[in-house]
Image: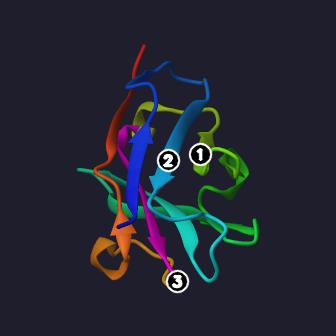
Amino acid sequence: QVQLQESGPGLVIPSQTLSLTCTVSGGSITTSPYSWNWIRQSPEKGLEWMGVIAYDGSTDYSPALRSRTSISRDTSKNQISLQLRTVTPEDTAVYYCAASPGYRGATMTLYDYWGQGTQVTVSS
């Protein structure tokens, strides 16, 4: 059974960089055709798809967040990472990682696997 676990700081200072890690167990992040996504949820915006890194290392980002977002991976640790630069209080949300062989979007039930999410608050 594939399991995903998000981790990272719960509090980030405005203008700094938010960095999160998704640790995958029970399966490899290099297994075709799976892609590994980051999604976030806030009361104001609801669920928002942020971006993805595929099994082959290729990436894609939401146009709204592309200029501030980077997704990378460490295959030796079987981890996916998210960096969101120049954060503001509007980036306060629960951040999820999720995996699917084809779906990329904000409907969590269309993913095969997802983590429990991690709360990130942006505040000084």
Q: Residue at x 27, y 77 (%)?
A: 109
When the figure is inspected, residue 100 is found, relative to residue 119, above or below; the finding is: below
Tell me where residue 69 appears, x and y as whole percent: 65, 49
Residue type, numbered disc 1: Leu
Q: The residue tagged with tag 3: helix, strand or loop?
A: loop
Of mark 3 and mark 2, the one earlier in the sequence is 2
Q: How is the image coloured?
A: rainbow
Query: Is the C-beta separation of discs 1 and 2 under 8 Å?
Result: yes
Question: How many residues crowd around disc 3 within 10 Å: few (fewer than 14), some, or many (20 or more)?
Answer: some
Q: CA distance from mark 1 to mark 3?
A: 20 Å
Question: How many residues crowd around disc 1 within 10 Å: few (fewer than 14), some, or many (20 or more)?
Answer: many
Tell me where residue 30 appears, x and y as whole percent: 67, 68
Which one is nearer the viewer's eye here, 55 or 119?
Answer: 55
Tell me where residue 44 appears, x and y as whole percent: 27, 51
Question: How many residues crowd around disc 2 within 10 Å: few (fewer than 14), some, or many (20 or more)?
Answer: many
Of mark 1 and mark 3, the one earlier in the sequence is 1
Identify the image quadrant of residue 61. bottom right
Residue corresponding to mark 3: 101
Residue type, numbered disc 2: Cys
* Res 82 label: 1
Position of residue 72 in the picture relative to residue 50 (left or right): right
Q: The residue tagged with tag 1: helix, strand or loop?
A: strand
Give the residues in magenta.
Answer: 92-101
Position of residue 8 in the picture relative to residue 120 (left or right): right
- Residue 96 on the magenta segment: yes
Residue corresponding to mark 2: 22
When the figure is inspected, residue 123 is found, relative to residue 61, above or below; the finding is: above
Residue type, numbered disc 3: Pro
Q: CA distance from mark 1 to mark 2?
A: 8 Å
Of mark 1 and mark 2, the one earlier in the sequence is 2
Position of residue 31 in the picture relative to residue 42 (left or right): right
